[in-house]
Image: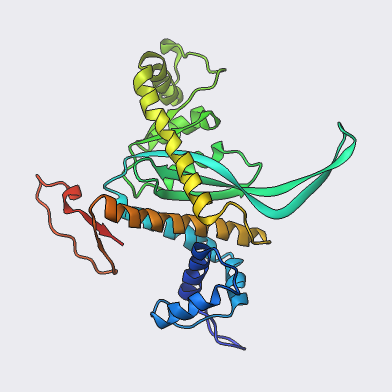
Amino acid sequence: PEPGMGRPRLGLADMTWACIYKLYTGLSTRRYMSALVEAQAAGYITRTPHFNSISNYLADPALTPILKRLIAESALPLRAVETDFAIDSSGFTTGQYARWFNARWGRETETHRWIKLHLMVGTATKIVTQADVSDGFASDSRHFLSLIEGSQAMNVEAVSADKAYSTKANMAGADAMGVTPYIMFKKSAVMPQPSLVPTEDSAWARMYFEFALRRDDFLRHYHRRSNVETAFSMIKRKFGEPIRSKGETAQINEVLAKVVCHNLCVLIHCAHTLGLEPRFGPAVEARPTSCAESPDAQQVLVF
């Protein structure tokens, strides 16, 4: 940030790193300060901020697009590995309560407020390529195309989702982007007539006949959707389901920072299990390949 009156401004890169590492450790801001002192000594950050500064920057709206970009960029090293993806959403509880009068039971009712995280996950490694955060009662279907569009840097060939995303607009939009949508049909879905199918519903009709006539192949792709449930379980088990932040912006940034931590853990895991060679740094020269050699043969995981 531009320098002004008062104390010197903290670097946004340092504070982004500090906020993500704070969510990675799972500690409170006061207990987390010793880890920041060690991080400054190791050269990861230029200065150790006050613990209140971490909470202030976590509530900064400027941090939201940075975290989303980090999620997308952290998935790029696995671009040659992932081709099939899955989309779903899950809720994260906050420390706030919502109260209302229940007219049916004649008493006041209260429950936790929660926010919803929408993810697009690679089914092979559970890497998250795109993430959106919405209100707990928001519709899932409206985030389907935005998640696919934000993951175009990956080699997206197919995507699977449950009935909540089963709309003609979603199937047509995915087909327009060159993605095969394996979305389960609702019970109210009606078999289209081949002679009466409009042009804009061609993707819907094609996938319906795929579901009706080639059920085994359709379900084989669709059941890969369970991998996104595994990704949610990994995030909640490792970094916790409750959201500690109080403000709406801070809650969004906290959830996105947990997704960044999850992607980093997936990259470390893939570097060992897939036998990939990590190369750190912005200036990485890839080894040239011939026409007969696949880019996958390089076996290089670029961070």
Depth order, front residue of 63/269: 269
Identify the residue shown where x is 40% and y is 56%: 265
Residue furthest bottom as drawn: 6
Vertical side of 128 occupied by 257: above or below? below
Identify the residue shown where x is 36% and y is 26%: 220
Vertical side of 30 occupied by 62: above or below? above
Residue 298 placement, left or right of 123? left
Q: Quadrant of the C terminus?
A: bottom left
Counting from the top left corner in percent of width and height, residue 295 is at 18, 49
Depth order, front residue of 195/28: 28
Vertical side of 238 occupied by 160: above or below? above
Counting from the top left corner in percent of width and height, residue 261 is at 45, 59
Identify the residue shown where x is 40% and y is 23%: 207
Residue 179 placement, left or right of 130? left
Identify the residue shown where x is 87% and y is 33%: 105
Question: What is the basis of the colouring in this image?
Answer: rainbow
Counting from the top left corner in percent of width and height, residue 204 is at 44, 23
Total marks shown come to: 0
Counting from the top left corner in percent of width and height, residue 56 is at 62, 72
Depth order, front residue of 267/190: 267
